[in-house]
Amino acid sequence: MSSPSIFTVLATLALWLTALALLAVVLAAAYRHHLTRHPYTGCRPCKGTGRRRSRVFAHSVGYCPDCTGTGLKPRPGVRLFNVR
């Protein structure tokens, strides 16, 4: 039984790498499209309300510093893909 030639192995490797690169481009384009439709997510620390209670004084309530009181935070990748 003979082993495949080096050219066959390199051609197969090039084909797989091309397919993987094409898949990565398609997935990035799909994620960017999703980000244009839904660029924000709810803020976790304030649970989307925009207000947080103080840890020291239970009666004290103020704006959430993480989302600046809006209750929304940009999703990961919004700045990377420059989506607004």
Image (cartoon, rainbow, N blue to C red):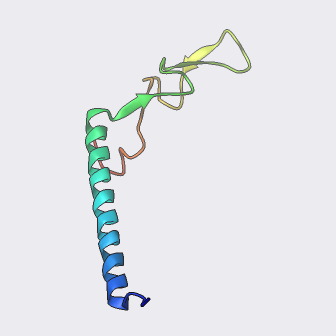
Q: Is residue 9 above or below residue 44?
A: below
Which quarter shows the N terminus?
Answer: bottom left
Q: Which of 65 and 39 is in front in this view?
A: 39
The residue lying at 42 percent from left, 23 percent from top is: 70
Is residue 61 among the parts visible in the rendering?
yes
Is residue 84 among the parts visible in the rendering?
no
- The spot of residue 27 in percent (x, y) is 31, 51
- The spot of residue 35 in percent (x, y) is 31, 39
- Residue found at the far front of this picture: 1
Q: In this view, does 81 lie above or below 66?
A: below
Which quarter shows the C terminus?
Answer: top left
Q: In this view, does 52 lie above or below 44?
A: above
- Residue found at the far right of this picture: 56
- The spot of residue 79 in percent (x, y) is 36, 47
The residue lying at 25 percent from left, 42 percent from top is: 33
In the picture provided, is 42 more to the left or to the right than 55? left
The residue lying at 71 percent from left, 21 percent from top is: 55
- The spot of residue 68 in percent (x, y) is 47, 28
- Residue found at the far top of this picture: 59
Q: Nearer the viewer, residue 50 or 36?
A: 36
Q: How many labels does the image show?
A: 0
The residue lying at 34 percent from left, 64 percent from top is: 20
Residue 59: image quadrant is top right
